[in-house]
Image: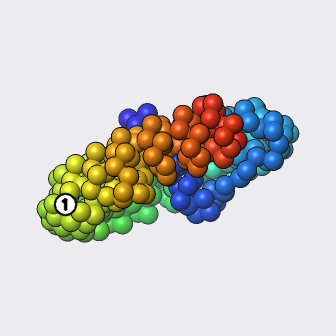
Amino acid sequence: MKLLHVRTQSVSLRIRLHYERTQSVSPGIRLHYVTPRYPECVTAHTTALCKDHECVTAHEAALCKDQEYVTAHEAALCKDLECVTAHEAALCKDPECVTAHEAVLCKDPQCVTAHEAALCKDPECVTAHKASLYKYPECVTAHKTALCKDPECVTVHETTLCKDQEYVTAHEAVLCKDPECVTAHKAALCKDLECVTAHKASLYKYPECVTAHKTALCKDPECFTAHEAALCKDPEYVTAHEAALCKDLECVTAHEAALCNDPKDPECVTAHEAALCKYLECVTAHEAALCNDLECVTAHEAALCKDPECVTAQHGAALC
């Protein structure tokens, strides 16, 4: 489950990096397209935003703003010298937070044991787990980014937005706006009573979409079988898989959010994993590679290749 979540986030991040480089994706965090200023950054791994040449060893999109942070791991936003050991995007704002793990937003010394992006605003929340937004002491047992706005929500699980007592059993980020939605699973945005069985954050606008799976954006009744956030804009796209943005009939087999921008380019149908194909030769580009030059066809893993010499860059979306 965690691996799938990480993978989904990775694909989403890559798409946002291209289309929403200046859009905010979470409170206090903005994505910025940064071109490396030093040649030493060429070894930076996984779209790391290196702003200082000492950051060359920074791992996985770490935002390094000071020499002492060179060991910061996995996109850690280190704002204090003591944060050098902070792990996985931890937002450390207090020296006691040095042991905080996985994007923990520590605003109080007692939060040092909070795990996985927990937003602790009350001392009682120290045991809160996984990015929970706690506003009441009773919410201390809430799990996984649960937005608890009512004491009765203490048992809600995984980013559930509880606005009414009847929603206490809602699971996994379900945005329940109607009492019948209490059984909706995984962030489903239920706008119609028939959607109660909709699964995984699906945006349903038609009753026929009730079986659509995994955040599918169904805008046409025929799209109800579209799988995994597929943006279905035409009946022919019903088989599009995994958030594929199909803009042409030939794209129906495009896999994993492939962005086919040329309706006259049938060769894009095999593009894999959100590849941005702008040239016929890009059809083999893998994993959201942004190919801007014909020689970039072998670039791997969302590498931003802007020069022909980058063709061998393969590891982790290096910014050449």
Q: In which quarter of the image is the N terminus?
A: top left
Frontmost residue, 58 versus 170 = 58
Residue 6, relative to residue 188: is it above or below?
above
State the SS at label 1.
Answer: helix
Drawn side of residue 266 relative to residue 71, left or right: left
Q: Residue at x 73, y 50 (%)?
A: 35
Residue 56: quarter of image: top right
Residue picked out by circle 1: 235
Horizontal and vertical percent position of residue 191: 25, 69
Horizontal and vertical percent position of residue 127: 54, 41
Residue 307, relative to residue 232: is it above or below?
above
Q: Which residue is drawn at 63% across and 50% down?
A: 105
Horizontal and vertical percent position of residue 175: 34, 61
Can you see residue 130? no
Count the numbered circles shown.
1
Q: Residue at x 27, y 56 (%)?
A: 249
Q: Residue at x 36, y 59 (%)?
A: 263
Residue 298: quarter of image: top right
Q: Quadrant of the C terminus?
A: top right
Drawn side of residue 152 relative to residue 17, left or right: left
Frontmost residue, 128 versus 161 = 161
Estimate how packed mark 1 is, as few (under 14), some (14 to 19) or many (20 or more) residues with alpha carbons within 10 Å: some
Drawn side of residue 120 relative to residue 217, left or right: right
Can you see residue 298? yes
Horizontal and vertical percent position of residue 91: 67, 48
Drawn side of residue 212 relative to residue 3, left or right: left
Kind of residue indicated by mark 1: Pro
